[in-house]
Amino acid sequence: MPVLIAFIAFFAFALFGGALLAYPIHILLANWFELDFERVASRCVLIIAIVLFITLFRKFGFGSWQEIGFSSNQKQFWRELPKGFGLGVLIMSPVVVGLLISKNRVIDVGWAWSSSNVSLLLLTALLAGLVIALIEETLFRGAMLTAIQRQSSNLFATSSTSFLYAFVHFLEPETNVVSHTLNWSSGFIVLKNAFLPLLEPTKIVDSFIALFLAGVLLAIIKIRTNRLAICIGIHTGWVFTIKIFKRVTDSNIYSEYAFLAGSYDKVIGYLAAICIIIAIVICIRMKYRPQKY
């Protein structure tokens, strides 16, 4: 329990610090770039979280990156990463097909289909997926899961990290801060707005369940294999598939089966939850040989 509280404090400090620094950082960058204040605030939170995590790495009880699931063998890491990526795409494929068949999403015929646009989309989706997966898996399935395992059961470690993993996905402000009214309190206004979606749980329950189950699947794989590269690969495959799918399709809110698509991004909902449950069952029934690095 103390470790979980420490990680919750870690998240709270990152959010507070990001809200505090958002205004001066935005003022500084405004001399060269036109940036949305909310975007600057979110990036400040991320940067503080990364710096804070690196600073507190040993305070969390870790002596090396291998202790949280990274392989000391770089070749092995890069062999397992694409395997995980393939699994991630495979798990998400039925979701893509199902949402198309149910007409929850329809092909965007107006999108500029060309070899250059497709190549750029594939590259940006892959890079975004890799960065997101590396950060989130290192934190949630790497450090957090491992640290809580040391003090509690696998069940508690899996459920608590999966809950927090799903929770942070809904910390997004829904209102824009007008640029000419910016001041030192603007970052905290953004922070307050970020919690607004959580005040209406019935509107996010479908996506929350799917994201929670995604965290459970990744936690089970990490616990049973101790291979963080596989988790990073799967997560990358999910983000890659979703970003491409959302870019080349449009959401159809009038679909008869609209309940299958998630409220979070109109992709991750009950249909995704069903696919992930199937993956969890298969994962539990498979035999693994845990790796010690």
Image (tube, rainbow, N blue to C red):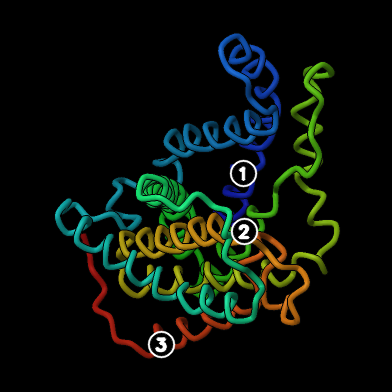
Q: On the rendered structure, is 145 left or right of 199? A: left
What residue did someone put label 2 on?
164
Q: Position of residue 114 (x, y in %)?
A: 40, 50
Q: CA distance from mark 3 to mark 1?
A: 33 Å
Q: On the rendered structure, is 83 left or right of 125? A: left
Q: Position of residue 242 (x, y in %)?
A: 51, 61
**Label 3 sits on what residue type?**
Ile
Q: Residues within 10 Å of mark 1 (few under 14, many from 20)?
A: many
**Label 1 sits on what residue type?**
Phe
The answer to whether residue 152 is above or below residue 49 is below
Residue 193 versus residue 143: which sits nearer the camera? 193
Work out whether residue 61 can be spotted. Answer: no
User: In the picture, residue 21 is in which quadrant?
Assistant: top right
Q: Position of residue 293 (x, y in %)?
A: 21, 59
Q: Quadrant of the N terminus?
A: bottom right
* Residue located at (39% from left, 75% from top): 90
What residue did someone put label 1 on?
11
Q: Residues within 10 Å of mark 3 (few under 14, many from 20)?
A: few
Q: Residues within 10 Å of mark 2 (few under 14, many from 20)?
A: some
Q: Are marks 3 and 1 in contact (CB under 8 Å)?
A: no
Question: Which element type, helix, strand or loop, lies under badge 2?
Answer: helix
**Label 2 sits on what residue type?**
Leu
Q: Are marks 1 and 2 in contact (CB under 8 Å)?
A: yes
Q: Work out which residue is located at the far top of the displayed protein and give it.
A: 31
* Residue located at (27% from left, 53% from top): 66
What residue did someone put label 3 on?
282
Question: Which element type, helix, strand or loop, lies under badge 1?
Answer: helix
Residue 262 versus residue 69: which sits nearer the camera? 262
The answer to which of marks 3 and 1 sits earlier in the sequence is: 1
Q: CA distance from mark 3 to mark 2?
A: 24 Å
